[in-house]
Amino acid sequence: MNVQYHPNAIYLFISALITLIASFIAWRRSAPGAFALGLLLLSMALWSGSYAARWTDISAEAKIFWFNVMYIGVIAVPAFFLIFALKITYNESWLKPRNLFLLSIQPVVSLLLLWTNKFHHLYYLSIQVIEKDNLTLFDFVRGPWYFVNVAYSYAAIGIALALIFLGALRSGPLFKNQYRLILLGSILPWVSNIYNEINFTALNGLDLAPITFGVSGVIFAFAILRTGFMDLIPVARSHLIENMQDGVLVLDSQNRIVDINSAMEKFLGGEPASLLGKNASDILSAWMDKTDPLLTGLELQTEMRIPKDPSRYLDLRVSPLYDKDQRLNGRLIVFRDVTERKDVEKKLRNANYRLQTQLIEIGTLQSQLREQAIRDPLTNLFNRRYLEETLDRELARAAREVYPVCIIMIDIDHFKQVNDTYGHEAGDLVLKAMADVLAQQSRRGDFACRFGGEEFVIVMPNINTEMARKRAQNLRESLNSLRVPYGRYDLAATFSMGIASYPANGDDRDVLLRAADRAMYAAKDAGRDHIRSYDQLKAMED
């Protein structure tokens, strides 16, 4: 191998080495576009390395060989750069197999035409090795397909740069530096190549683009290692954050606003340019009296109301951001509009309140219905149904706890005469007045019932017959002194009473009620307005 030493070769070998290292750095990332960027940088390294080898080797066959190898990188760079741009701008929908196939047609045809040029001379018209300034140089005359390839390459690169530029416009301020570096590293070789094509004859075929690849590789490596490129891609931020319905606010370590998304701009009601760089406490103080709890190093979740018309409710989450050394370098504040949820909760509370009110009303109605079911509508005393149910329970309890139960059965003497003489309305007034006296003179635990017609029963738990007689006597005196006004009359009546005791006079309800009934009729037979006990009746019968 005959070699020559040329400064261009040294620059090109260095450029190839740098881009090769940058390609490995890109491949170590797992972000979208990392693989495409690795292939792009590898193609640039192949371009630079082959070009350097072409400058170094002086034989015509070797120069043609390296020229053909170099064009693999030349043709691949625009295609991989377009794929890379589509990836990082999240336009992968264009990278369908059909589109990739169409994209590869021109590069593949160009390579085939280049490698078979001696048969058709479409790519270059002539090629030769010349001597100039004691150096062996490679010179060729461009053919028609060469310009077709240039046009295709510039179109692909132009589209890719446009996509990245649009991505930069959509990105937040925190990622502007990344986009600047990407655009700088991409435009520099392109501008060099344009200059090279314009001054092709004057430069004697010297291609400036691969010499600048090293600079591009350094820029890309710097973007990856220092600005987080390929770790958090700006356009990923655009798609994931800008399109979020939640408001996002990014603060630096001094609580200054360094990034903001569109939803947050709507919440704050200001343009990003007017908000960036301001202290978050100054902005949020319009919403809350104290912002200190939000700007501590602790994670926080709370709800707040913003005073707008109409007012809005926000769910607020604050997360501290730490660097790799666990030093606080910022905060992420996410606001979620929960006004609709609050409205639903309010409606639900109102519905629950109405439901509780209705339940109370229903309970009251049920109580009233139960009272109506167990109360006598005329006297408001318990009715016979209640007496039968309750007396059974009372007797069962008395049997368990071993205490007596006495009942007094009361009948109004000659009540039919009251109805016949004064009318049923007068009779009802007498019944009501009698019921009031019975209710007033009943002990706690006693219960008075209207047994039927003009008959009444008082149940008195835990009392013996003698005490029941005394209470019956007091009750008869109160009833006898009763005067019921009716028109110009004062209605009065006498009362016959019978007393029976459990368990002495009966061990169940029916037996006990029959005993009291017999005692009451014994009082009537004695001339009415008397009190008789079942024990007295049995003694008289014996």
Image: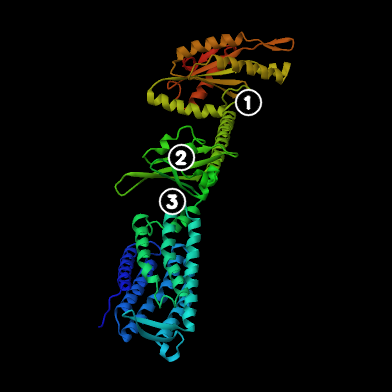
| Residue shown at 55% from the left, 12% from the top | 475
Which structural element holds mark 2? helix
Q: Amino acid at mark 1?
A: Pro
Residue farthest along the front direction in this orientation: 133
Mark positioned earlier in the residue sequence (2 or 1):
2
In percent of width and height, residue 158 lies at: 49, 68
Left or right: where 338 falls relative to 434? left
Q: Which residue is mark 2?
A: 280
Residue 188 percent across, percent down from the top left: 42, 65
Q: Which residue is mark 3?
A: 174
Q: Amino acid at mark 2?
A: Ala
> Looking at this view, is 316 or 491 the one in front?
316
Mark closest to the chain's N terminus, 1 or 3? 3
Residue wearing tag 1 = 377
Q: Is residue 444 visible?
A: yes
Q: CA distance from mark 2 to mark 1?
A: 74 Å
